[in-house]
Structures are given as structure tokens and as C-alpha cells.
């Protein structure tokens, strides 16, 4: 188990170095580019196999206990140790990271983004995986910071070199926001280490451990500094503005990993560091964190509603990015409740968001490859069939649309609709449980927190779920059904559009719709696991909650 966990962190780094070397003659395949892409699939596949083996060998009867631990002195003068371990909180995130990176490598083998040499692409992808896995595996504050920062440079280059329009500006915005937040976070981590004499996260999490030396004032300062750095990565409103630009410009696999695992590093830091090590400081700032989370939920939903309106020039990729601001607001609301119910909901929502939003970004990237655009007005142009004669209600009946995604690529359209309804939190799918438990946590927050305030935040979050359902259903109607959407008036599916959205000729004859290929075999392979796990987590939430709940109970109980 120790070797498996250490191998999870080290193997991607070794693979990244090997990707830069010339391939052996017998492994070159048709060309060197194909060989290095196959190398990426192989290495990430081995890492995924190791993560599954780690999960299988994990002692599920004691998920609150740190397992597969490695504790080696690294810098004795500063008290920094190479301390690794996994419990019920970090194990699902490790498996999710390994799964998404493997699926990204597999997808890139068949659909490599336009850009420089695949060697650099694969090396950066594997370095990104190593940094993310290390963030969830390390138990030393300084190692956590190093791993936290390790992912920034690979993601910067993935956006700047393989991204789309405005990629340089988006990459600079991403790196500047996250680096500035990380500098402030480092000050908070150093403050804890100086005051307690240790950076060991396990020792600091126990009530009778070194954290007893942290006064209330020190805890406030530490939470404020650490929280800013974590909030930027989460992303929490109003520190979120880097996210839509980064997602819009990033290549498909960059968006998948950014939404699927990198955002989880911030919320994981709140659960692993802020809650157990500085509980008094978190208790003071919890109402403010919850308020900003609730605002983020409403803000993200309203931004998406604005983007989905006809004529707004909304970008589907940007819309999903803004939806992440709202979804991660539920995660932060659950953490701010400081209750086992809320924190378990936050951890569940983390995993659900990684699965569902990863699937959506995969599909939006494939949709852009097929149509050349992610502009919602462009995607919504439909060619309606003959309408029933007459007027009144009969004239408003849906007409078959030759350009709608359901008609042109039914399996692709069906899977996109599945991802949308999963994202809106439909019961029976993974998105439901995390949001519901987060609101339950806000309904009855931890002792000492203002219940009326948290009830207000819960109501706002509930309103956010309604707004989320509204914009995602409108996305399905426009993209999959080819309907016109006018939020200020009637919305007629497939109705004639004076602005030309129907794509009909002036004489009323439907214009032929361009062909859209349906799902390819490699897309089935890359996306089916995400869809299956979304259903499995929705129907069997105990599989995940059974891992996280004992660990959360112990974390909030001061190690008891």
C-alpha cells in the first residue's frame, strides 16, 4: 500500500521525463507523435490501475485512519517531512484524478488539440497529474503548498500553447490570480508552522496536539490568509473571474482537468487544513464564507441565464464554466456549515461535479470539433419541418427539426441532455446528493453559528437550484431540440424566426442541415465511465458517504 501511494505520485513524473526522450525503435508505431501519445495513455492507465488497486486494498472498515503512510524526514532544519497518507476523504479524489487524466490521455490520442509537439503536451499532462495527486496525498503543509503550486505551470502552458482564441490573455489571468492567492496562502501556512513548531497536518488536526498553541487571533489570521488562496482556486465569488476565461480558451482536456480536479484542490484544502487545524478561526469566518457561497450560487445561475438568451452571443463552454461557480458554491456552503452533514455533502458534490462537468466539457469540445463553434446562437439554428396549418395552439406545436442535435446525432444529443439533467441535480443522479446534503447542513449549522443567517443562505441556494434547472433545460432545448428561446416572451420550439435562427429559406422551405457525426468509438470509451459513475453515485450514494463520513466525523471532532 505504501508503494502504491508513492507510485501514484512518482510514476507520472517519471513518465513526463520519459515522454521527452526519443521513443525506442520498436515502439515508434507509425510516427513519433503517435508513440508519445500512446505513452501518455499507457502511463496514465498504469496510474489508474494503481489507484484502483489502492482503493481495493484500502481498509474500508476504518476509513478515518490514515493508511498507506510514508513519513520520511526531508528538511530537518525546517521540520519538513515527506509525509504521505490516504483516508476516506482523499481516496475518492485520488481515484477521480487518475480516472479523468487517463480519459483525457485516451481522448487526446484520437483527438490531439492543435498546437506544438505532442511530446510537450504529454509531459505537461503527466506533470499536472503528479501535482494533483500529490496535493491529495501529502500530509505536510509545505509539501501541500509545493504540490498546490506544481499544477499551475503545466496548466498555464496547456492553455497558452494548445488553447483557442484569447489563449494568452486567459493563461496570464489564470496564473496571476492563482499565484497571488498562493502567496497569501503561504503566509498563513508559515504562520501555523512557526507558532506550533510543526507542519504535520495529522498532528495539527488533533485537539491535544500542537494546534493548542494557536491563539484565537493567530487562527483568524491563518484562516484569512489560507482561505484567500484556497478561495481563488475553488473558485469563490468574487475571486472567480479568471475561471470563465481560462475554460473558454483552454483545450478540451485542459477544461476537463481544470473543472474536474484542479477546482477540488481548493475545497479539499478547506476540509483538510482550515476546518481541523484552525476551527476557531473557521467558526468566525464561516458566516462570511457561506454568504459568499450563496451569492456565488445565484450569480453563476444568473450569468448562465444571460448567456443562454437568444442573441446574447453566449458561448456554451463559457456557460458551463459559470455553472461551475454555482456548483462549487454548494461545496463551500456545506463546508461553511461546519457540520458532518454539510461537509459530507461538500465532498460528495466535489466528486459529482468532477464527473458531470468533466463529461460536459468533453462533449462541448467534441461539439466544437463537429460544428466549428460553441456559440449558442449558432448551435441553436434549426431547420424546422412543415408546420401544421392554421393558427392558435396548433401552430405552436413542436415541429421536427432537421438541424437539431437529436435529429442529426441522436446518441450525442441524448448524452449531452443526460449531462445537463445530471448537472441540474436530478434525483437518482450524482448531482442531487451533494447539493441536498449541503443545504441540509445549512438548515442546521454547527453550534454557535447563526441559524437564521444560514437558513437565508439555504433559501438562496434552493433558489439557485431552480435557476440552474432553468438555464440547463434551455440549453437542452436550444442545442438538442433546435428551439428558439426568448426569455422575455414565448419560447416556441422550432418556430419560425425572423432573425434567421430557423435556417429556412425565404420561401419557407427548410434549409438542409449540415451533417454532424454521432458518437465515435473512442468517445464511447472516454465518456461512458463518467456517465456510468454518475448513475452509480446517484443510485448508491452510500458507497461514497460510507468512506467520507467516519473521516469527517473524526476531523471535526479533533481527532476523536
Image (cartoon, rainbow, N blue to C red):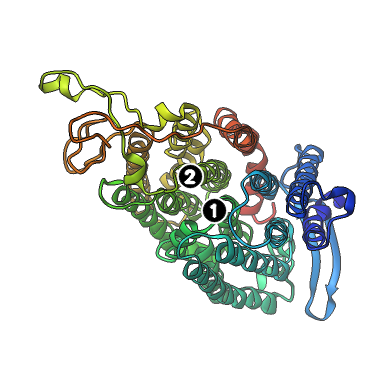
Vertical relation: 532 (above or below) 242? above
Vertical relation: 336 (above or below) 509? below
Q: Position of residue 506 (x, y in %)?
A: 18, 35
Tell me which numbered mark, 2 or 1, is placed earlier along the sequence: 1
519 on left or right of 491: right
Q: 40 or 116, which is in the foreground? A: 116
Write the residue at 75% across / 38% down: 60
Q: Position of residue 8 (x, y in %)?
A: 79, 52
Q: Are marks 2 and 1 in contact (CB under 8 Å)?
A: yes
Separation of residues labelled 2 and 1 (CA atoms):
10 Å
In this view, which residue lies farthest toward the left?
391
The residue mark sitting in front, 2 or 1, is: 2
Per the image, the residue denoted by label 1 is: 255
Q: 153 or 440, which is in the foreground? A: 153
Per the image, the residue denoted by label 2 is: 364
Vertical relation: 229 (above or below) 104? below
For label 2, the SS is helix
169 on left or right of 535: left
For label 1, the SS is helix
Write the residue at 57% across / 44% down: 344
Amino acid at each position: 500500500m505504501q508503494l502504491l501511494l508513492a507510485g501514484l505520485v512518482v510514476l507520472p513524473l517519471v513518465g513526463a521525463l520519459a515522454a521527452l526522450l526519443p521513443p525506442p525503435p520498436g515502439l515508434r508505431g507509425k510516427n513519433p507523435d503517435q508513440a508519445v501519445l500512446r505513452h501518455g495513455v499507457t502511463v496514465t492507465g498504469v496510474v489508474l490501475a494503481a489507484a484502483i488497486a489502492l482503493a481495493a486494498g484500502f481498509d474500508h472498515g476504518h476509513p478515518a485512519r490514515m493508511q498507506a503512510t510514508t513519513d520520511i524526514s526531508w528538511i530537518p532544519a525546517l521540520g519538513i517531512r515527506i509525509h504521505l497518507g490516504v483516508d476516506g476523504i482523499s481516496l475518492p479524489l485520488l481515484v477521480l484524478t487518475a480516472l479523468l487524466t487517463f480519459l483525457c490521455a485516451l481522448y487526446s490520442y484520437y483527438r490531439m488539440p492543435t498546437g506544438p509537439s505532442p511530446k510537450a503536451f504529454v509531459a505537461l499532462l503527466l506533470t499536472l497529474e503528479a501535482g494533483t495527486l500529490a496535493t491529495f496525498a501529502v500530509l505536510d503543509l509545505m509539501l501541500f503548498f509545493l504540490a498546490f503550486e506544481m499544477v499551475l505551470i503545466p496548466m498555464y502552458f496547456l492553455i497558452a500553447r494548445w488553447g483557442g482564441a484569447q489563449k494568452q490573455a486567459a493563461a496570464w489571468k489564470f496564473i496571476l490570480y492563482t499565484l497571488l492567492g498562493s502567496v497569501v496562502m503561504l503566509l498563513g501556512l508559515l504562520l501555523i508552522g512557526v507558532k506550533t513548531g510543526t507542519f504535520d497536518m495529522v498532528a495539527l488536526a488533533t485537539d491535544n496536539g500542537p494546534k493548542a498553541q494557536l491563539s484565537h487571533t493567530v487562527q483568524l489570521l491563518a484562516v484569512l490568509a489560507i482561505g484567500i488562496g484556497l478561495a481563488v482556486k475553488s473558485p469563490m465569488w468574487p475571486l472567480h473571474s479568471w475561471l470563465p476565461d481560462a475554460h473558454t480558451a483552454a483545450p478540451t482536456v485542459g477544461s476537463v482537468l481544470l473543472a474536474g480536479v484542479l477546482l477540488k484542490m481548493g475545497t479539499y484544502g478547506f476540509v483538510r487544513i482550515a476546518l481541523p487545524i484552525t476551527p476557531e478561526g473557521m467558526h468566525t469566518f464561516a458566516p462570511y464564507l457561506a454568504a459568499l457561497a450563496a451569492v456565488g450560487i445565484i450569480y453563476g445561475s444568473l450569468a448562465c441565464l444571460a448567456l443562454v438568451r437568444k442573441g446574447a452571443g453566449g458561448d456554451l463552454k463559457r456557460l458551463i464554466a459559470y455553472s461551475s461557480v454555482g456548483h462549487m458554491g454548494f461545496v463551500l456552503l456545506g463546508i461553511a456549515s461546519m457540520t458532518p452533514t454539510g461537509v459530507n455533502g461538500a465532498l460528495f458534490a466535489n466528486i459529482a461535479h468532477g464527473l458531470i462537468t468533466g463529461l460536459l466539457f468533453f462533449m462541448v469540445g467534441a461539439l466544437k470539433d463537429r460544428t466549428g463553434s460553441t456559440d449558442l446562437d449558432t448551435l441553436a439554428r434549426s431547420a424546422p419541418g412543415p408546420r401544421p396549418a392554421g393558427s392558435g395552439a396548433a401552430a405552436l406545436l413542436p415541429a421536427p427539426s432537421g438541424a437539431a442535435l437529436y435529429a442529426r446525432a441522436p446518441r450525442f444529443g441524448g448524452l449531452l441532455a443526460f449531462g445537463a439533467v445530471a448537472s441540474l441535480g436530478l434525483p437518482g443522479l450524482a448531482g442531487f446528493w451533494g447539493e441536498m446534503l449541503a443545504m441540509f447542513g445549512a438548515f442546521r449549522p454547527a453550534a454557535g453559528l447563526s441559524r437564521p443567517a444560514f437558513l437565508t443562505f439555504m433559501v438562496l441556494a434552493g433558489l439557485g437550484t431552480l435557476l440552474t434547472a432553468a438555464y440547463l433545460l434551455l440549453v437542452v432545448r436550444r442545442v438538442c431540440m433546435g428551439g428558439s428561446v426568448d426569455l422575455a416572451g414565448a419560447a416556441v420550439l422550432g418556430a419560425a424566426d425572423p432573425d434567421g435562427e430557423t435556417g429556412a429559406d425565404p420561401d419557407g422551405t427548410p434549409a438542409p442541415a449540415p451533417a454532424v457525426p454521432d458518437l465515435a468509438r473512442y468517445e464511447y470509451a472516454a465518456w461512458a465511465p463518467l456517465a456510468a459513475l454518475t448513475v452509480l453515485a446517484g443510485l448508491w450514494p452510500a458507497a461514497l458517504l460510507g468512506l467520507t463520513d467516519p473521516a469527517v466525523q473524526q476531523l471535526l471532532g479533533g481527532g476523536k
